[in-house]
Image: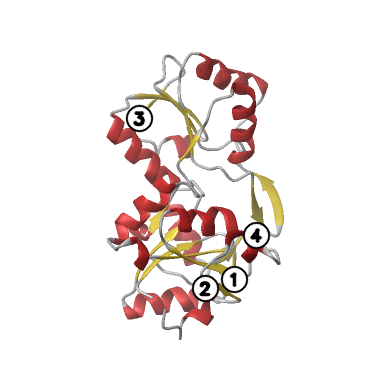
Amino acid sequence: MKNLIIDIDGTIIDGNREINNSSLFINKLENIGSNFILATNSIKSHEVQVARLKKIGINVEAKKIYTPIDSINLIIKDKKISNAMIIGTHEEICQIKVNNTIKNPEVVILLDFEKEKFGYRELQLIIDKIENGCPVISASGSPYYLKDGKKHLDTGAFVTLIESVSGKRVEILGKPSNKYFLNAGAILGSKNDNVYVIGDDWNTDILGAKNAGFRSILIKSGKYRRGDENKGKPDFLVDNLTDLLDSDM
């Protein structure tokens, strides 16, 4: 297994706890020279992710981390966008390579609704921008994430709300979008059918991988529930990451 896109939360870490013998698995990949990146729908900076993983014994460089913000910045560069209205914390907004403004934005970018004081007024402002023809892109389409085994509202829940009110589609640039996975695959520099995606979510990880032409491995942890393999139909189903170490895949 030489070309891997490995999900972070629910696959190698739960909160601040290592799961699935992930440190053994990742360190083994490093030792044998496997080509891999660690993919997440989290919009924490690469440096924050590296520090978080280091605490559970996984030592990787920042360039090994891939987030939706990487996809967003590629869109900004390709479309030569200069001004955007960005919803998120200061730390998150600073990662976006564009001027943040509510006056005449070329696009609305949804990063995070959780940590800032956010309410009806801000939601209405987004709707107003859409009504005036401004497109909206989002870092995530996931309605929730798991932390210490509990569900927490994620950006995708607000995406659904905004779409239902406006009647307009919000473009998702995190998992499970094709752009997210294809950009990640391009980083690996491998043909699509030679890339494996490992994750715990039958939708964002497994279907996202399959729609991009990648092979998929569903792991029984995190968001996984019995029967999810029948929904996403992964190429492989495993109990633990170490099950893959002796695999000839």
The CA span between labels 1 and 4 is: 13 Å
The crowd level at tag 1 (other Cα within 10 Å; few <14, some 14-19, many 20+) is some
- Whether tag 2 and tag 1 are in contact, CB under 8 A, the answer is yes
Tell me the distance, in whole angstroms, between the alpha carbons under discs 3 and 2: 36 Å
> SS of the residue at dot 4?
loop
Residue receiving disc 4: 223
In this rendering, the answer to whether 157 lies above or below 118 is below
Residue 223 visible:
yes
Q: Callout 3: 10 Å neighbours few (<14), some, many (20+)?
A: some
- Marks 4 and 3 sit apart, C-alpha to C-alpha, by 34 Å
Dot 2 amino acid type = Ser
Q: Residue at x 46, y 59 (%)?
A: 51
Q: Amino acid at mark 1?
A: Ile
Dot 3 amino acid type: Val
Where 231 sits versus 91, above or below? below
Judging depth in this view, the residue of 8 and 137 nearest the camera is 137
Going 30% across and 30% down the picture, which residue do you hit? 79
Q: Is 4 displayed left or right of 143 in the figure? A: left
Locate residue 123: give its quadrant. top right
Residue situated in front as seen by the camera: 46 or 138:
138
- Check disc 2 and report the residue beneath it: 22
Task: Give, as a three-letter code, the residue at label 4.
Answer: Lys
Residue at numbered disc 3: 98
Residue contact at pointers 4 and 2, CB within 8 angstroms: no
